[in-house]
Amino acid sequence: MNRTACSLAATGFLLMAGCAANVPHTVPEFRERSASPAIVGDGLEVRVYPLRSDRDEVRRALNGLGARLASSNALVLRGLEYYEFDLDRLEDLVDVVSNENPSSVRWIGQSFTWQNLMPERVPVDSQQAWLALPGRTWSTMMEDGPVVYVESMPLIGYDRLVGSESRVELVREQGLRMESILRHGRCLVLIGGDGLPVVENEAEGIPSGDETRTLGGALLAQTVDSDAEESDFLVFIPHFTPGRLRPLRPGPFERAERQPES
């Protein structure tokens, strides 16, 4: 798709988003990109890989890896497809759909405040509007071990010039919130979808070559290299310290129940 078409398509979904039930949002923090993040403690790592395969091939690869679609219907329709699968199969996915090193690797750690999970803001509509993916994440313990909680929601920003002052208007849709609980040995992948469930494409006679860009497609179109035509995909990886991964000691009542009767 050329830049003019991308701009028109992006403008279209921004206008539709403006008609939806949006809520104001404060400016998220934008951390600098880091090529070699220091993994400290528990938390979340975010990688960006160039995507060199079409959507159908990506979905076939994810299905072959036993990935589970973690997106709601609302997210799928807006092109935000999250998939969860085993972390030890990530390299297999990368070999098939990318075959390249990540273009960005960042250590988010734990953040209770919203910050952009993307390497940077994604400009659309001739730089007058932009997209981001604010998120927050933290680690906690559950009965079966430690987990990393991830929450994200796409954000649309508008740069406004009011008189001589420059202002930023931010909106996001509550219906596009994603929440995930990642356990040790699992990961989450975000790809930009075409806005239609895979099983309904052929059944409804919808052409697979539709060039309409969804919100997810625009968000992941050019996250690092503005001159690249290919899209990217994001990978969310939980990390835990060795101490958190040790088996929990049984409590006094549990130990008493395990003692054999005399």
Image (spheres, rainbow, N blue to C red):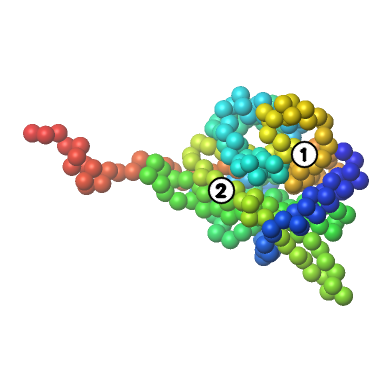
Q: Residue furthest front?
A: 204
Of helix, strand and loop, which one carries label 2?
A: strand
Vertical relation: 233 (above or below) 29 = above
> Does label 1 or label 2 sit earlier along the sequence?
2
The answer to whether the residue labelled 1 contacts the one labelled 2, judged by CB atoms less than 8 Å apart, is no
Q: Residue furthest bottom?
A: 164
Numbered tag placed on residue 179 in the rendering: 2
How many labels sit on residues? 2
The amino acid sitting under disc 1 is Ser
Which residue is located at x 74 percent, y 35 percent?
51
Q: Nearer the viewer, residue 84 or 93?
A: 84
Numbered tag placed on residue 213 in the rendering: none
The span from disc 1 to disc 2 (Cα, nearest Å) is 23 Å
> Residue 89 at x, y = what percent?
58, 29
Is 260 placed left or right of 168 in the picture? left
Q: Nearer the viewer, residue 226 or 136?
A: 136
Residue that numbered label 1 is attached to: 231
